[in-house]
Image: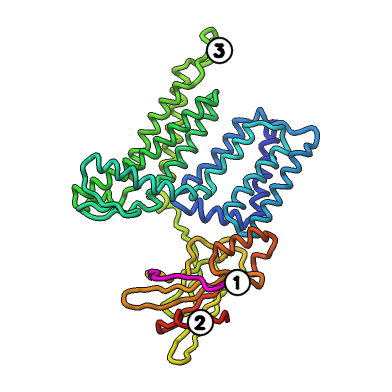
């Protein structure tokens, strides 16, 4: 083992120790990154990060003296990780874990931007990018509608649905282009780090990658709608629309690298020791083409289907009654059925006391509204949410509230706000109360708070 390998072994040790001491977070990242088609490129990110540290090994120098400032930052990041984990704030502990890793390296080694970039590149495997999916979805609807109008295709747009004579297309969050944005950012930032010397060129290159990713997705959706129109919704491409996107995206990325080559530093003509510009461009083009192919392969729906079979686990409902809320990842549920004055009442209390960080009432798929039911009316009475729902000809009313630290909250957003203001309160003291009454007379009664 040479001296150059000591820093690399230290980085690997810190990384593995962080995962070992934060296994619930590691499991959470695995579920929502490696087990999600949108982030299936995450399998490549650790290997790319390892290469980046290896590429930057000449800049890895252990500190000779203790850096109190970086040590204080490391302690602050650890405290942030503890608080966000206790609050089960997903975005918080994902980013806090990355900050702990980065600050630990900066405390151990002399500061260098290459260390920051190499560690920060792990952000591309974290499932933090879903925040931009809704605005990208809305933008896709607007732009695709514009393209179809240019092509004189009769359309009717309502929210995320585009209706054409042949049928209806929904531009869901999966069609927002988020996958192409993440891949474009990951590849373009990597290329800029390895090959571009000027910040201005890197900004232009990454900007072109983002714009191209958006346009690629809009073209993909437009082509799918056109195929549906001209084949009367019978083409197989309508179902396998992800593969079509990569056939459009890969040629764009190859053109992007050709554009990036124009930014590279031209070597000194009098310097005969280096490789020629054409040789360098050829090597870069080959390497980046391989990277694009790997990203496309790992991000394709077919690859994820064949090699990524693990699905999100849910706990089965204990009650056999058909009308139940949508609740995932809970530790226990108690069901009580009562009948009084010809009124049947079913009450369920869900407890969230388990090690899984997804075991929380504010999990994004949880809803007090049963599947396939629609809300007719909803109002809040004190600390209880009362919803009037309908399914076919059946109408019922449901009551729901959350309870933590002896307090009640009508909505999950109110619980989040309370926990943000009180981050040290135990996350295990929380429950979700849900009840339904038959027949339809719940809202006609005065709720007594019991």
Q: CA distance from mark 1 to mark 3?
A: 73 Å
Return the residue at label 1.
408
Q: Position of residue 338 (x, y in %)?
A: 49, 88
Q: Position of residue 342 (x, y in %)?
A: 43, 91
Residue 450 horizontal/vertical position (percent):
57, 81
Relative to residue 197, is residue 261 drawn left or right?
A: left
Residue 446, disc = 2
Q: Secondary structure at mark 2?
A: loop
Asked if marks 2 and 1 touch (Cβ < 8 Å), the reply is no
In the image, 414 versus 100, the foreground residue is 414
Q: Main secondary structure of the magenta part?
A: strand
Callouts 1 and 3 close, C-beta under 8 Å = no
Q: CA distance from mark 2 to mark 1?
A: 18 Å
Q: Which residue is mark 3?
A: 273
> The magenta stretch spans which residues?
374-384
Considering the numbered disc 1 on the image, is that residue within a helix, a strand or a loop? strand
């Amino acid at each position: 083992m040479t001296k150059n390998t000591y820093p690399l072994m230290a980085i690997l040790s810190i990384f593995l120790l962080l995962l070992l001491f934060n296994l619930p977070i590691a499991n959470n990242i695995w579920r929502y990154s490696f087990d999600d088609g949108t982030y299936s490129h995450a399998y490549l990110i650790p290997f790319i990060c390892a290469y980046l540290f290896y590429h930057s090994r000449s800049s890895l120098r252990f500190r000779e003296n203790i850096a109190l400032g970086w040590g204080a930052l490391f302690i602050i990041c650890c405290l942030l990780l503890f608080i966000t984990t206790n609050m089960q704030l997903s975005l918080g502990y994902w980013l806090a874990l990355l900050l702990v890793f980065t600050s630990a390296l900066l405390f151990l080694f002399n500061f260098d931007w290459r260390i920051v970039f190499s560690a920060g590149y792990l952000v591309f495997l974290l499932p933090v990018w879903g925040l931009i999916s809704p605005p990208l979805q809305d933008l896709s609807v607007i732009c695709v509608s514009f393209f179809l109008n240019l092509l004189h295709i009769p359309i009717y747009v309502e929210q995320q649905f585009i209706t054409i004579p042949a049928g209806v297309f929904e531009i869901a969050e999966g069609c927002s282009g988020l996958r192409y944005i993440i891949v474009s950012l990951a590849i373009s930032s990597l290329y800029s780090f390895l090959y571009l010397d000027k910040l201005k060129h890197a900004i232009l290159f990454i900007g072109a990658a983002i714009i191209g990713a958006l346009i690629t997705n809009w073209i993909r959706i437009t082509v799918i709608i056109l195929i549906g129109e001209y084949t009367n919704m019978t083409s197989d491409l309508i179902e396998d629309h992800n593969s079509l996107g990569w056939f459009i995206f890969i040629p764009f990325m190859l053109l992007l690298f050709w554009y990036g080559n124009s930014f590279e530093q031209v070597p000194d003509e009098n310097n005969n020791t280096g490789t020629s510009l054409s040789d360098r461009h050829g090597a870069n083009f080959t390497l980046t083409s391989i990277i694009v192919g790997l990203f496309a392969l790992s991000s394709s729906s077919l690859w994820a289907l064949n090699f990524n079979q693990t699905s999100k686990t849910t706990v089965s409902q204990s009650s056999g009654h058909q009308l139940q809320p949508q609740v995932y990842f809970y530790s226990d549920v108690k069901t009580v059925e009562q009948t009084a004055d010809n009124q049947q009442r079913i009450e369920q209390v869900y407890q969230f006391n388990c090690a899984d960080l997804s075991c929380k009432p504010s999990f994004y798929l949880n809803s007090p509204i049963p599947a396939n039911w629609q809300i007719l009316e909803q109002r809040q009475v004190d600390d209880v949410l009362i919803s009037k729902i309908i399914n076919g000809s059946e109408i019922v009313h449901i009551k729901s509230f959350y309870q933590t630290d002896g307090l009640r909250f009508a909505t999950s957003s109110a619980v989040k706000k309370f926990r943000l203001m009180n981050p040290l309160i135990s996350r295990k003291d929380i429950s979700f109360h849900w009840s339904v009454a038959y027949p339809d007379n719940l809202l006609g009664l005065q709720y007594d708070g019991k």
